[in-house]
């Protein structure tokens, strides 16, 4: 199915409050069912790689949300639902690519005592700077229009 058709179908489907409630309830039940599993042990290299991927997913989601809001493709009340949907999709993609869940990474950071690891701090700082620069560019565009 083409991405545009899929996106439009999801918008229409999620605009219906009853259908949106079914989607959100089903998502929560699935999350509860599978969140009780034990964390998978990770190496330092796997944690670093995973953290980079997670930061990329967050940045991509930020750009996508900005584009949706800017183009006014949906009512404002739908944005939170789309954010939840995008988070689920990013989580699924992350698992497919790595075999890990985000909570595995979080637990590994604690287990490996990496809370103050310079490599992880650098990754987070780089992506925070990218995000800040992106938002500043969008703000400048808005002023120029």
Image (cartoon, rainbow, N blue to C red):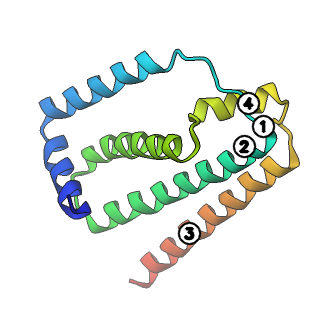
Q: Are marks 1 and 2 in contact (CB under 8 Å)?
A: yes
Position of residue 46 measured from the top left corner of the image (x, y, whole percent) = 72, 43
Residue under the point 73% across and 30% down: 108
Say which mark, if any, is on residue 134: 3
| Marks 4, 3: nearer the viewer | 4
Q: Are marks 4 and 3 in contact (CB under 8 Å)?
A: no
Q: Give the labeled residue for mark 4.
A: 108
Q: Are marks 3 and 1 in contact (CB under 8 Å)?
A: no
Q: Residues within 10 Å of mark 1 (few under 14, many from 20)?
A: few
Position of residue 69 measured from the top left corner of the image (x, y, whole percent) = 33, 60
Marks 1 and 2, how far apart at CA: 5 Å
Q: Is residue 27 above or below residue 46?
A: above
Q: Nearer the viewer, residue 42 or 144?
A: 42
Q: Are marks 1 and 4 in contact (CB under 8 Å)?
A: no
Position of residue 142 measured from the top left corner of the image (x, y, whole percent) = 43, 76
Residue under the point 66% across and 46% down: 50
Say which mark, if any, is on residue 110: none
Res 101 → quadrant: top right
Marks 4 and 3, how far apart at CA: 30 Å
Marks 1 and 4, how far apart at CA: 8 Å
Q: Residues within 10 Å of mark 3 (few under 14, many from 20)?
A: some
Q: Are marks 4 and 2 in contact (CB under 8 Å)?
A: yes
| Marks 1, 4: nearer the viewer | 1
Give the mark nearest the N terminus, 4 or 2: 2
Q: Which type of secondary structure does the marked residue at label 1 adopt?
A: loop
Give the mark nearest the N terminus, 3 or 1: 1
Say which mark, if any, is on residue 46: 2
Q: Give the labeled residue for mark 1.
A: 43
Q: Is residue 12 above or below residue 111?
A: below
Q: Which type of secondary structure does the marked residue at label 2 adopt?
A: helix
């Amino acid at each position: 199915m083409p991405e545009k058709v899929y996106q439009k179908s999801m918008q229409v489907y999620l605009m219906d409050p009853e259908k949106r409630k079914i989607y959100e309830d089903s998502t929560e039940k699935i999350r509860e069912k599978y969140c009780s599993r034990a964390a998978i042990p990770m190496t330092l290299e796997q944690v670093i790689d995973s953290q980079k991927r997670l930061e990329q997913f967050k940045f991509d989601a930020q750009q996508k949300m900005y584009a949706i809001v800017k183009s006014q493709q949906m009512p404002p009340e739908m944005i939170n639902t789309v954010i939840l949907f995008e988070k689920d999709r990013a989580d699924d993609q992350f698992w497919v690519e790595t075999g890990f869940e985000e909570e595995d990474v979080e637990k590994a950071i604690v287990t490996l005592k990496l809370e103050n690891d310079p490599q992880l701090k650098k990754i987070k700082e780089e992506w925070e700077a990218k995000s800040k620069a992106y938002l500043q560019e969008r703000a400048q565009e808005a002023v120029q229009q």
